[in-house]
Amino acid sequence: QVQLQESGPGLVKPSETLSLTCTVSGGSVSSGSYYWSWIRQPPGKGLEWIGYIYYSGSTNYNPSLKSRVTISVDTSKNQFSLRLSSVTAADTAVYFCAREEEFYFDYWGQGTLVTVSS
Amino acid sequence: DIVMIQSPDSLAVSLGERATINCKSSQSVLYSSNNKNYLAWYQQKPGQPPKLLIYWASTRESGVPDRFSGSGSGTDFTLTISSLQAEDVAVYYCQQYYSTPYTFGQGTNLEIK
């Protein structure tokens, strides 16, 4: 059974960089069959896809966030990571990592709340 | 970006009755080369991540009860729960994966009447 777990600081100051890691167990980020995504959900609101990474390192980002987002993969640790720079209160959200099976999301992490506040 | 609009925003249905949620995309998500609709449905309960219910518009994910079904093609899609159970109370989202950025509907909040 594939499991994903997000980790990282729950509080980030405005203008700083949000950094999260997703650790995958029961499966491999090196599998060529899947893409690995980040998705976020502001409190009480809907879902926004942030971007994905393939094991080779190729990425695809949401244009609305592209200038501030970096997703990377560490196959040796079976992890992938999200960095979002210059954060504001609008970036306060639950951040989910998820596995893409043929473009839909079949496995999700439990999510981690990141609050942007001084 | 493909805009996904769900209706209604909120729905109250009696136990054992049928629940129907609609999703409309701003452009077709039917890929002509394989005749597949790039549309998924998810269920999200409070404090939990979304759970995949349906993909390719009508294929039920393994383990999902058969009271859940998806239909539609092109730009208009429907999620139907044939006989509502108490555990089906949740927010439901449609998602297109025809093109990036992947986009979701705004969600439909399903409650018991």
Image (spheres, coloured by chain):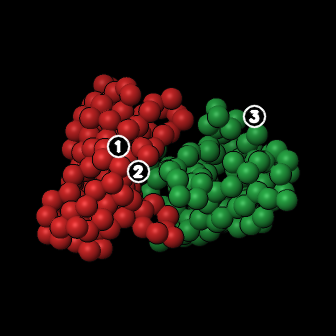
**Residue holding disc 3:** A67
- Crowding at mark 3 (Cα within 10 Å: few <14, some 14-19, many 20+): few
**Residue holding disc 1:** B6
Say which quarter of the image contains residue A96: bottom right
Say which quarter of the image contains residue B67: bottom left
Give me the C-alpha separation between circle 3 and circle 2: 27 Å
- Crowding at mark 2 (Cα within 10 Å: few <14, some 14-19, many 20+): many
Q: Give percent across and percent down for residue A93.
A: 64, 57
Rendered hue of chain A is green
- Chain of the residue where label 3 is placed in the rendered structure: A
Eyeballing the image, is A41 above or below A113? above
- Chain of the residue where label 1 is placed in the rendered structure: B
Q: Are marks 2 and 1 on the same chain?
A: yes
- Chain of the residue where label 2 is placed in the rendered structure: B
Helix, strand or loop under label 1: strand
Helix, strand or loop under label 2: loop
Q: Which chain is red?
A: B
Label 1 near label 2: C-beta < 8 Å?
A: yes
Amino acid residing under circle 2? Gly
Residue at image position (42%, 44%) is B105
Report the front residue among B111 and B71. B111
**Mark found first going from the N terminus, 2 or 1:** 1
Report the front residue among B71 and A57. B71
